[in-house]
Amino acid sequence: MEHRPLKAETDAREHLVVIGNGMAGCRAVEELIARDSNRYRVTIFGAEPRVNYNRIMLSPVLAGEKSFDDIVINDAGWYAGNGIALIAGDPVAAIDRAAKTVTTRSGAIESYDRLLIATGSDPFIIPVPGKDLPGVIAFRDMDDVDTMLAAADAGGDAVVIGGGLLGLEAAHGLSLRGMKVTVIHLMPTLMERQLDEAAGWLLKNALEARGQTILTGADTAEIVGNGKVEGVKLKDGTLIPAGLVVMAVGIRPSVALARDAGLAVGRGIQVDDHMVTSDPAVLAVGECVEHDGQVYGLVAPLWDMCRSLADGLVEQPTGYRGSVTSTKLKVSGIDVFSAGDFSGGDGCEDIVLRDASRGVYKRVIVKDDRIVGAVLYGDTADGGWYFDLLKKQEDVSQLRDLLIFGQAFAAGGGAADPKAAVAALSDDAEICGCNGVTKGQVVSCIAKGSHSLDAVRGTCKASASCGSCTGLVENILTLTLGDEVKAGPKTMCKCTSFGHDDVRREIVAQAMRSIPEVMQKLHWTTPDGCSSCRPALNYYLLCALPGDYVDDQQSRFVNERMHANIQKDGTYSVVPRMWGGLTNPTELRAIADVVEKYSAPMVKVTGGQRLDIFGIKKEDLPAVWADLNAAGMVSGHAYGKALRTVKTCVGSEWCRFGTQDSTGLGVKVERMSWGSWMPHKFKIAVSGCPRNCAEATIKDFGIVCVDSGYELHVGGNGGIQVRATDLLCKVATEQEAMDHCAAFIQLYREEARYLERTAPWIERVGLEHIKARIVDDEPGREALRARFLYSQSFSQDDPWAQRAEGAEAEHHAPMARFTPQKELA
Amino acid sequence: MTTAEWLDIGWVDQIPVRGSRTVQVEGGDDIAVFRTAEGKIFALLDRCPHKHGRLSQGIVHGGAVACPLHNWRISLSTGEALGEDKGCTPTVPVKIDGGRVLICRASTLKAAA
């Protein structure tokens, strides 16, 4: 087949052909376009049948933190929009430098004026017997990830050969996907090229604690199997079973094309400071090149090379001077940073800080008053600072005593102030390692109008990949804009980098069923969360799996666990439900009896038309509830993120102005909606006429009866920030009012963030969104209502009755009593 | 077994994981006994250093408990308030013997007094 690029016949521009659709090739083209978008006609050949993606983010894809779409750098629109011809899936097989053409595997021939080789590197496969068995793969591209995911679906044992950066990320991903993983590493410590022995040991322990088996000093003899891989045999005779073997022992520059074409090749394709090879018409960039005797296998040098390359292509040469590299391990919850040389030696001094309880190890290597290397484990916040000092070769003699405590401390602040730390960074300090973005670039991108985290991610791409620099970018936003920062989706809490909406979406998408599962799959950084995220996760799961999810009592705030409101003295207040605010002599007698029997010091009428009994002791609660139950009363949920009360006025039955039976409707609404857990408390009122005695226009859902029907109002709040409701719509019948109410509650339950009242929720998503879902979309409304009623079929058990019958007695009774005079009772 | 030094308060399993139970001390404050997700047992005076909230009613996470009144986080091992807050709740030494939870008699008396 022949590829005929657009306008080839009529386009007089020079033709730049790029071999390699990877990170280096595409970045080079991006840099070129940024300088002069019209100078060259560009054709890119890629071996993989897909658009350009961020190869270093394959680990998060494997670990399930990202999808392929998330790591696409340039989608099809980018190629089309910039007039770039992409030929994906048909790799270049030969270069004819005399004719200035390239020939693809399928035989297509393309001529070039300038040729850019960006073929990257190939995984090194150790030459042991069995290396070609099915099930033995490398970890290099999306196809490898797909193979690993398929293997993980089947479960079983996996062996990763190589305990370097890539191998450990592969092992982490496979382990998270449920495989039993063994890492075989030839050297005595993991990541020995980046970490010293102490950090390597900490890392090994941390990975073993996560269930991986780590074998160091282990030499692979052969890969065994009959027709497919079955295990790995070590030189000491040990046989490790494996249905999947990932070889991640290193990479080699991919130089075959260049060597066949007669270009100068050492360890890589040899280039000068402008990335030009031994042929002036042929350039090369990325992991395939050798510059000044150095070959790089990390992403950061690519950005520097691509800048110099593009400068040369538009004839404003600057020249590449080599890169100093730093490394960060992308294994969630394990922070490892390494930069420069840590081998020590004459004239080198080590400054070391260890904090065993926090699992922190820091080592900075100083030579002649300059930092030459740094290894950080457990706390890598200052990695960027050390790296910056290292690259600039700054004299640190003045900082030396405080250097190890980090930037904030060494700068004299004493207390760690992350903003001060960011403010102190120079403009060319790198913020985002994944995308090679400096502080200066982030600041200028903010100055040009990107005033939120999302906007920054969308423009200069800082923190758009692995997200580990999100905090830095947020601090730069605050520093640059002061209080004008538009808060992006905040993370749920410090335990996770995900926001509420992300977590909810993933719970549903991945069909998660428990809090530990969510924490595991979404890489919580704490073992069991905190008092912010646990109640939220418990609610999200409860909402997603009605009737199925087992409520976690230890993830409930005390009031919801005790089904009563804790008061400042540690006693509780108890509010029985009075439907629609109605009561009767039996209920009033029962309440009066409880007050006397348990010596409750106070009874109060609440704003929601209920009676609140104060001063009940924790251990008396079940007996109080039993007495109230006996008079027919159930929990009023005055303590819960749940339906609180339906407040009513007396309506047409008694009131001379009443237009409808507001009291009766209030009772029906409360019977329908009581017991439902929600993102936050939820209050309803029904007023019998527009005089609105039930104050329906400051409730989450308010009904105002009029002669011709029912006005439905939403999003009111009488709290700290008073907000009057928005009118949702007007309906003709009681049934319609009830149906809209049920649908609205369910929409709120499914879409609002935990602890978000309806008022801020509606302001966030807009009333039009609510109207579109509840008023305009009748089938959608009916579906919401049906989901609400289904969920309600499981939630309308009186929690008081269960406790009164002895359920969860441990919440109420002390474990033991100790009378100092009589020893233990 | 209760001795001159130690008070036997019951089985480990009586304390919910990531939860707490209390020991009533006549004439004094309760002692709160916690069990973490990792299965470690700690005992503290059941009184937050801030506004005297019942720590036994808080959410236990990691090695800390969040006070139910104002969400102060208190270290279960040291009784110190974590983060920005300052304050300390007395701790009571605990040991486990054959699945039984024993708390230090002298510290219990001192803390609850």
Image (cartoon, coloured by chain):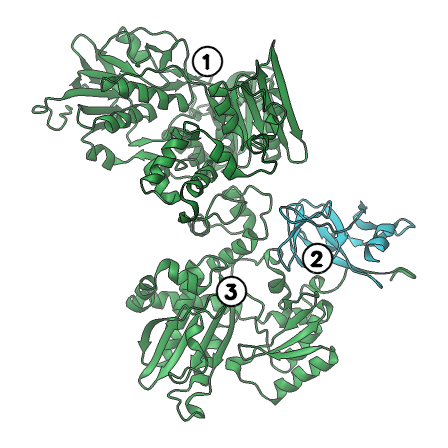
Q: Which residue is mark 1?
A: A127
Per the model, the C-alpha gap separating discs 1 and 3 is 60 Å
Chain A appears in which tint?
A: green
Give residue A433's position: percent from left, percent from top: 43, 29
Note whether residue A204 is visible.
no
Give residue A271's position: percent from left, percent from top: 32, 11
Q: Secondary structure at mark 1?
A: loop
Chain-order first, disc 1 or disc 3? 1
Indicate whether A547 appears above or below A736: above
Q: Secondary structure at mark 2?
A: helix
Per the model, the C-alpha gap separating discs 2 and 1 is 61 Å
Per the model, the C-alpha gap separating discs 2 and 3 is 24 Å
For the point 45% across and 52% down, the residue is A504
Instruction: Name the mark nearer the viewer: 2 or 3.
Output: 2
Instruction: Name the mark nearer the viewer: 1 or 3.
Output: 3
Note whether residue A404 is visible.
yes
Label 3 Cα crowd, 10 Å radius (few <14 / some 14-19 / many 20+): many
Q: Which mark is residue B56?
A: 2
Q: Is residue A389 left or right of residue A292?
A: right
* Amino acid at dot 3: Trp
For the point 63% across and 71% down, the residue is A800
Q: Secondary structure at mark 3?
A: loop
Q: Which chain does tag 3 point to?
A: A
Label 2 Cα crowd, 10 Å radius (few <14 / some 14-19 / many 20+): many
* Amino acid at dot 2: Ser
